[in-house]
Image (cartoon, rainbow, N blue to C red):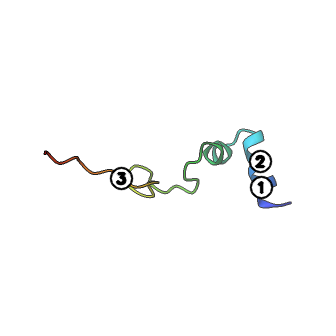
Amino acid sequence: MTKDDDVARLAEIKTFRGMRHRSGHKVRGQRLRSNGRRGSALGVQRKK
């Protein structure tokens, strides 16, 4: 079995880990609010 098969099996039987994988969240208990944010943040526009 490959890693993809394992993840698909977890999602299929609706385990917590499978749902986290499917939604794209961290799986192993890392914090989500402040760490590992994706993309670049846009700054505030300056007055002209």
**Discs 1, 2 touching: Cβ within 8 Å:** yes
Identify the residue at image location x=45%, y=54%. 39
Find residue 41 and report its horizontal and vertical position in percent.
35, 52
* Residue under numbered circle 1: 4
Mark 1, Cα crowd under 10 Å, few <14 / some 14-19 / many 20+, is few
Split into 4 quadrants, where in the image is the N terminus?
bottom right
Q: Residue at 77% across / 47% down in the picture?
A: 8
Observer-nearest residue: 18 or 35? 35
Q: Amino acid at mark 2?
A: Ala
Q: Dot 2 surroundings within 10 Å: few (below 14), some, or many (20 or more)?
A: some
**Left of 48 or right of it: where is 32?**
right
Front residue of 35/43: it is 43
Q: Which mark is residue 41?
A: 3
Which percent across, then down, holds residue 14? 71, 38
Q: Residue at x 27, y 51 (%)?
A: 43
Mark 3 → mark 2, Cα distance in angstroms: 32 Å
| Quarter in which the C terminus is drawn | top left
Kind of residue at badge 1: Asp
Q: Residue at x 49, y 57 (%)?
A: 30
Disc 1, disc 3: CB below 8 Å?
no
| Element carrying mark 3 | loop
Query: Which quadrant holds residue 2?
Result: bottom right
Give the residue type that dot 3 points to. Ala
In the picture provided, is 43 more to the left or to the right than 37? left
Tell me the mark number nearer the camera, choosing from 1 and 3. 3
Residue 22: % across, % down: 65, 44
Q: Is residue 34 left or right of residue 23?
A: left
Residue at the spot of label 2: 8
> What label sits on residue 22 in the rendered view?
none
